[in-house]
Image (cartoon, rainbow, N blue to C red):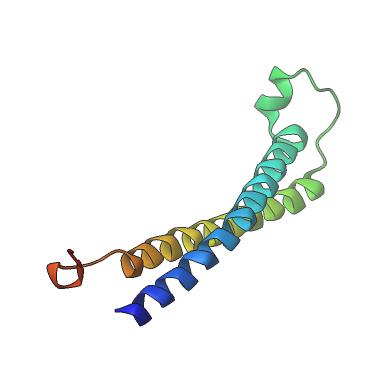
Amino acid sequence: MYERTKIGFVIFTCTLLTFPFMMSSWSDWDESEIEYKENCDELYRLYTQKNGSINYDNCDYLDIKKSQGFKNFLTSFFLFLFSSIGGLVLILPSGADEIIIN
């Protein structure tokens, strides 16, 4: 029982370490999304009254950057989610045999 709890605390500690990485990747993805909208989205440019031509070569680069940011965020989010659930499952008692009543 104690070995399982130790492993659970180690996994849950990894969860606490992945949280800042997840938030950072979320911020990076959001910034790349905004940059893509500002430079390439015609409706957004119309609403914000931005003038000038669209550089479509730059749009391809920004689209790839936006997609990569989403993949990084999704990976870090699922790593955070699964490690937190896995850590809690190992820490919390799973049956009546593991509950100690004095």
Q: Which residue is at a point 67% across and 45% down the rendered structure image? A: 27
Question: In the current view of this chain or complex, which residue is farthest to the front?
Answer: 102
Q: Which residue is at a point 84% across and 23% down the rendered structure image? A: 51
| Quadrant showing the N terminus | bottom left
Q: Quadrant of residue 54?
A: top right
Q: Position of residue 38 (x, y in %)?
A: 75, 33
Tally the marks. Answer: 0
Q: Position of residue 29 (x, y in %)?
A: 65, 48
Please give left or right for residue 18 compared with residue 2 in the image.
right
Q: Quadrant of residue 35?
A: top right
Question: In the current view of this chain or complex, which residue is farthest to the right?
Answer: 52
Q: Quadrant of residue 33?
A: top right
Q: Position of residue 64 (x, y in %)?
A: 69, 55
Where is 93 relative to 53, above or below? below
Q: Nearer the viewer, residue 87 or 97?
A: 97
Q: Which residue is at a point 59% across and 62% down the rendered structure image? A: 17
Where is 85 relative to 37, above or below? below
Where is 21 relative to 96, above or below? above
| Quadrant showing the C terminus | bottom left
Q: Which residue is at a point 19% across and 66% down the rendered structure image? A: 99
Q: Position of residue 73 (x, y in %)?
A: 58, 55
